[in-house]
Amino acid sequence: MSKELSKAERTKQFIIEQTAPIFNAKGYAGTSLTDLTHATGLTKGSIYGNFENKDEVALAAFDYNFNRVTNYIKERILKTENSIERLLVYPKVYRDFLIIPFLQPGCPILNTSTEADDTHPKLRERATNALSFWKTSIENQIKRGIKREEIKQDTDPTEFAVILISLIEGAIMQAKVTGKSTELRIAMNFLTQLINNLKT
């Protein structure tokens, strides 16, 4: 029995991993069942034998995409103890956004929130929670830096988190539309300056 469950879980994970880039690139509405069967090499019956419907696949794909980005950044943040260096991971990573293979389809939060703001409540909720998680993690980095006396005492954690996220998401949007990294580089250079200005 446990082998059957293990196989089912592996199949489910395979479906998520193969369809996640498609949902991120084409969106919920733009991703068809044919896209899912082509990506996985599985039949409609196999896919819906593991997921109740397309909604369930899309939600799992969003979680997978967001966790992948989060873990990629977290891994780099944890390589240093210094608060400024930790924050500088963001402009370093996003400056290369268009050339990092799994990031090329775009930011899952931006892509999902743009499409699902009015049309898909569950996906919108996922994007909202992900954005809140990201904002809180940046706020915590700022608070940690203030406590360690590496970041200026008068720095507002929430204000800086909002500015950082806005700069990144706005720059990604422009880069995705134009297919060029010019705006991305300009914004990330500016963000780097802002972070360095937080030093005590």
Image (cartoon, rainbow, N blue to C red):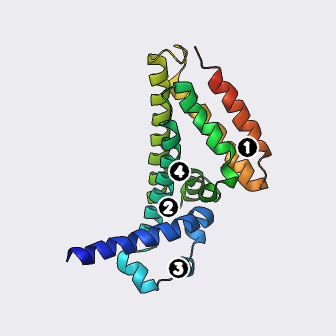
Work out whether mark 2 precedes mark 4 in sequence or the reverse, and give the earlier one.
4
The answer, for residue 186, to whether it is visible in the render is: yes
Q: Are marks 2 and 4 in contact (CB under 8 Å)?
A: no
| 170 w.r.t. 8: above or below | above
The image quarter containing residue 52 is bottom left
Left or right: where 178 falls relative to 42: right
Work out whether mark 2 precedes mark 1 in sequence or the reverse, and give the earlier one.
2
The kind of residue on which mark 1 rests is Leu
Mark 3 vs mark 1: in front:
1
Look at the numbered disc 4 and give the secondary structure of its residue.
Answer: helix
Q: Nearer the viewer, residue 179 or 17?
A: 17
Instruction: State the residue at coordinates (51%, 82%).
Output: 41
Residue ID for mark 2: 120
Q: Which mark is residue 33?
A: 3
Q: Are marks 3 and 1 in contact (CB under 8 Å)?
A: no
Residue lying furthest front = 79
Location of the C terminus by quadrant is top right
- Mark 3, residues whose alpha carbon is within 10 Å: few (<14), some, or many (≥20)? few
Left or right: where 107 falls relative to 127: right
- Mark 1, residues whose alpha carbon is within 10 Å: few (<14), some, or many (≥20)? many
Q: Are marks 4 and 1 in contact (CB under 8 Å)?
A: no
Mark 2 vs mark 1: in front:
1
Look at the numbered disc 1 and give the secondary structure of its residue.
Answer: helix
Work out whether mark 4 precedes mark 1 in sequence or the reverse, and give the earlier one.
4
Marks 2 and 1 sit apart, C-alpha to C-alpha, by 29 Å
Work out whether mark 4 precedes mark 3 in sequence or the reverse, and give the earlier one.
3
Mark 4 vs mark 3: in front:
4
Residue ID for mark 4: 69
| 142 w.r.t. 55: above or below | above
